[in-house]
Image (cartoon, helix red, strand yellow):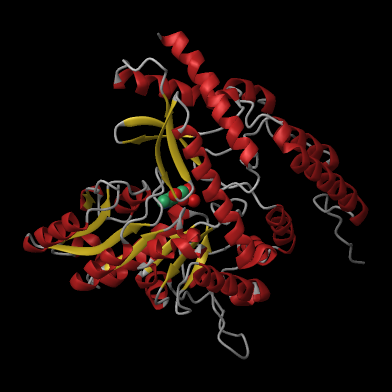
């Protein structure tokens, strides 16, 4: 007689329903009351380690209901909530609730979106999602790509495609060291740190990066770019790619993408755009001139977990000719039997990027895109920009605040006490204290930026929960804290 296996990891349907319903109730209440909480309790690592405890892995199993309930309590009471209306630090959005449901559904079915045969409907949904994201930011339907964990990985994907396309073929067999010419890449000083990681990790070395200076509007100086390329060509280097930024991480500035594209054409370079933060703003008709040139990019990185309001993690790499991804990432070991698919072409996503087994990130993006539609996104993104402008104007009109910059949905500002004889060094020190005190106080969460040598508070609006009332209150909080610190320091 064969035995039916009874596995302790399984939950019977009643138990799953009971725990699941309770969890959904708790999450609904969490979303409903999130604005009543502090943005962060700002507890020390020591205190948190005590909470987690230092027991060894339990010898015997424990009750699932109790485990979920304890974890709910831990997370709801000891987290920083980027879903809070006054979280405007760095660039992480409030997570769309439908995205949370999507992740639960995706985890339950658990498709492995590495190969079509292992994830039939999920692969088709991811393909559609990638196509929609390209369309969303105004690209032609030629673009293909895949979802990745975030902006860094999306940029890495573009970087590697560029390396394959523009470096000598021999590097696939003999490594980057086999190129007789030094490989070089070009980007502005404001480019996000991913480029350093990429240059180091993918064999070019950090000295291969040509950091091009910016013009007074903080965009890459295109004349300096061309001079640098010419200089490298004369000195036996092999320029590979130019990286333009569509929404820089500190101040939201968009490079002159059309000019960068023209320079890439002239010198036969790969044109990559880092649109991790800013690319979705291309959906706003008045802003579309800023993003002209995006449609010429060979590759683009964007980040649905930023301005498309999806929960972490969701990045997307788009490549104009997806064959470059296959040339870069595809391999065919004998143990893969992935071509037995019937009618139509089966896309195997493992051939398009770094990952092999892949989760179903696309579902949350696909569902959020549909829940909102183009109109819905246009409205939310426009409102984020308007709130950023409002913060700038309120600061500009306040005697104790200086509005420093405003681009897309990023505002920088600083606190300046009323006496006007204070040194820049003191103001920088004061505002650095201010960022720290605001972050630990939990009433509002802003980050920092140094703009024109001024240490600033930085607010990035990618938060569908923030309203005008929050912006007014944030001004009050900043001034209140600024005064306190000035009293303390002076
Ligand atoms: C956020 C950001 C990145 C990095 O993206 P992650 O999702 O954090 O990996 C890269 N470039 C820019 C411009 C960004 O704003």
Q: Name which quarter of the figure residue 64 lies in.
A: top right
Position of residue 211 in the picture relative to residue 352 (left or right): left
Q: Is residue 86 visible?
A: no
- Whether 172 is drawn above or below 466: the answer is below
Residue 352, percent across and down? 46, 70
157 relative to 220 in the view: left or right = right
Residue 338 vs 421, above or below: the answer is: below
Asked if one can make out residue 429 in the rendered structure from this viewpoint, the answer is yes
Residue at the image point whose x is 19% and y is 57% from the top:
225
Residue 186, image x, y percentages: 24, 56
Q: Position of residue 375 (x, y in %)?
A: 62, 65
The percent position of residue 75, horizontal first and vertical second, equals: 70, 36
Q: Nearer the viewer, residue 319 or 109?
A: 319
Total marks shown come to: 0
- Residue ID at (62%, 25%): 49
372 lies left or right of 184: right
Residue lying farthest left?
A: 234
Q: What quarter of the picture does the N terminus occupy? A: bottom right
Q: Quadrant of residue 450 in the image?
A: top left
Farthest residue to the bottom: give it. Answer: 343
């Amino acid at each position: 007689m064969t035995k039916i296996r009874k596995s302790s990891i399984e939950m019977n349907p009643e138990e799953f329903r009971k725990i699941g319903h309770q969890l959904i109730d708790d999450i609904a209440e969490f979303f409903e009351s999130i604005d009543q909480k502090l943005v962060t309790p700002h507890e020390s690592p020591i205190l948190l380690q005590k909470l987690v405890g230092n027991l060894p892995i339990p010898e015997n199993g424990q009750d699932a209901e109790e485990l979920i309930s304890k974890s709910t309590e831990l997370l709801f009471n000891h987290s920083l909530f980027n879903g809070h209306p006054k979280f405007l630090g760095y660039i992480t959005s409030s997570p769309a609730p439908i995205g949370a449901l999507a992740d639960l559904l995706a985890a339950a079915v658990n498709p492995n979106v590495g190969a079509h045969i292992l994830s039939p409907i999920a692969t088709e949904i991811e393909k559609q999602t990638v196509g929609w994201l390209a369309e969303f930011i105004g690209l032609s339907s030629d673009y293909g790509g895949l979802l990745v964990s975030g902006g860094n990985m999306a940029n890495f994907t573009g970087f590697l495609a560029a390396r394959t396309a523009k470096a000598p073929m021999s590097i696939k067999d003999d490594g980057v060291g086999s190129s007789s010419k030094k490989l070089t890449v070009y980007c502005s000083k404001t480019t996000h740190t991913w480029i350093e990681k990429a240059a180091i990790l993918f064999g070019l070395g950090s000295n291969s990066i040509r950091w091009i200076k910016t013009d007074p509007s903080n965009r890459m100086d295109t004349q300096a770019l061309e001079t640098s390329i010419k200089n490298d060509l004369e000195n036996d280097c092999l320029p590979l790619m130019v990286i333009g930024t569509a929404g820089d991480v500190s101040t939201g500035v968009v490079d002159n993408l059309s000019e960068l594209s023209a320079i890439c054409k002239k010198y036969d370079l790969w044109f990559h755009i880092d649109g991790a933060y800013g690319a979705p703003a291309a959906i706003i008709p008045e802003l579309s001139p800023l993003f002209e040139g995006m449609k010429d990019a060979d590759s683009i990185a964007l980040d649905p977990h930023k301005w498309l309001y999806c929960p972490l993690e969701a990045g997307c790499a788009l490549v104009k000719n997806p064959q470059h991804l296959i040339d870069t990432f595809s391999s065919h070991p004998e143990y893969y039997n992935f071509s037995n698919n019937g009618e139509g072409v089966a896309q195997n996503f493992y051939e398009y990027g770094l990952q092999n087994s892949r989760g179903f990130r696309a579902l949350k993006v696909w569902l959020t895109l549909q829940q909102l539609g183009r109109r819905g996104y246009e409205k939310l993104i426009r409102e984020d920009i308007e709130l950023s402008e409002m913060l700038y104007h309120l600061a500009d009109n306040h005697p104790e605040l200086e509005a420093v910059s405003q681009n897309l949905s990023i505002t920088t500002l600083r606190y300046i006490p009323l006496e006007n004889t204070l040194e820049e060094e003191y103001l920088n020190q004061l505002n650095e204290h201010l960022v720290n005190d605001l972050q630990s106080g939990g009433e509002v969460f802003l980050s920092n930026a140094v703009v024109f040598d001024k240490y600033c508070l930085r607010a990035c609006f990618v938060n569908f929960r923030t309203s005008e009332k929050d912006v007014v209150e944030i001004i009050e909080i900043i001034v209140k804290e600024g005064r306190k610190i000035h009293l303390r320091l002076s």
